[in-house]
Image (spheres, helix red, strand yellow):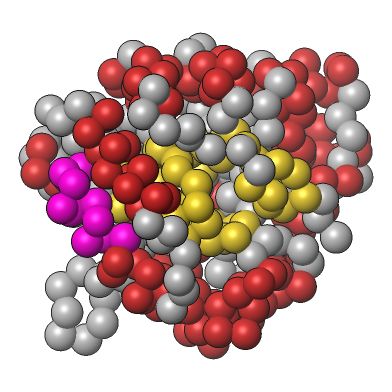
Amino acid sequence: MIPTIDLGHGLQVSQIGFGAMSLGGAYGRADHDESIATLNRAIDLGVTFIDTANVYGQPKEGVTGPAGTNEELIAEVLKTRRNEVQIATKFGITGLRQGNSSAVRGDRDYVLQCCDDSLRRLGVDTIDLYYMHRRELDRPIEETVAAMAELVTAGKVRHLGLSEVTGPELRAATSIHPITAVQTEYSLWSRDVEANVIPTAAELGTGFVPYSPLGRGYLTGQMSRETASKGVLQGQERIDQNFDANQRVVEAVRAIANEVGATPAQVALAWLIAQGQAFGLPVVSIPGTRRAARVEENAGATEIELSADQKQRLDQIADLAIGARQLAFNGPGWTSAERE
């Protein structure tokens, strides 16, 4: 079973969570029954932390966009297992149009409405962790967090989180309400958050939730060239454009995996746990997958002990990577690193 830790401000979650975006078609269409089975298997293994967002999901027939179908999928599992999990969901992204500031909203009316919509789709009375998915750059973050704080007061949300914020933005948000977690891309080859965001989070008592902890699947060594050119990966510098060149990254991870009798995925997740210990804050990765077998594999990461030498060699892997971390469709200022 996966150990449970305090992510921040009393929110107890499993040391490894589950990122449900993978069940929403981002990396290829997901089968409904298999998705339900994967979620149930994750909970059986002790995964108590499930992450989703109001924009995740596969479009319904006759509907433009995902329309919250990922939350509706999770709701089917919550009907019988709500007391076993903590649910995190998000608001803020209204579209993914290159360079269009209207793709993100953080005004009070929008925040409150999104929460009500997510509660309805999830079929729950309270959201355990509610994230601002992206910041509306021309609106003070304090204004958005103040609206989120109203949801805590109303009993609709237990804890607040922020995604892809800078260190100063996290500090400004914390002046309005305690922030339980920051979620940002973080992995062996995406380490920009270590400069400012993670030290600030550690100082403020905020936990860290790495998304894409396996490099969108690339670091597992299981990704095919064909997969690397489809869905959200199409056109991405690291994975699509430099697929062959970055195989040296995979080989470096695999070499250490062979030493410890593990898989590359388990080593990549174990490294993140070790990084949390080094920085003095809880780190809870949310790897996503459509397959129950992968959930079982990922769960094994909590049992891996990396030696100082192995850790040092893994620390050097980011220098091997070719290409930027952001996706091809992202507009300016989409990641925290671009704003720091």
In this picture, residue 23 sits left or right of residue 100: right
Query: Could you tell me which residue is drawn at 22 percent across and 33 percent down?
Result: 143
| Quarter containing the N terminus | bottom right
Can residue 156 be seen by looking at this rendering?
yes
Residue 35 versus residue 4: which sits nearer the camera? 4
In this picture, residue 52 sits left or right of residue 172: right
Q: Quadrant of residue 5?
A: top right
Residue 216 versus residue 108: which sits nearer the camera? 108
The single residue placed furthest to the front in the displayed view is 153
Residue 199, x across and y down, in percent? 56, 15
Residue 112 sits inside the magenta stretch:
yes
Query: Could you tell me which residue is drawn at 45 percent across and 43 percent down?
Result: 160
In this picture, residue 211 sits left or right of residue 324: right
Question: Looking at the image, is 37 positioned above or below residue 256?
Answer: below
Residue 260 versus residue 246: which sits nearer the camera? 260
Query: Could you tell me which residue is drawn at 48 percent across and 32 percent down?
Result: 178
Question: Looking at the image, is 189 positioned above or below residue 82?
Answer: above
Residue 312, x across and y down, in percent? 77, 16
Question: Looking at the image, is 253 positioned above or below residue 293?
Answer: above
**Highlighted magenta segment, given as a residue range:** 105-115
Residue 208, x across and y down, in percent? 57, 34
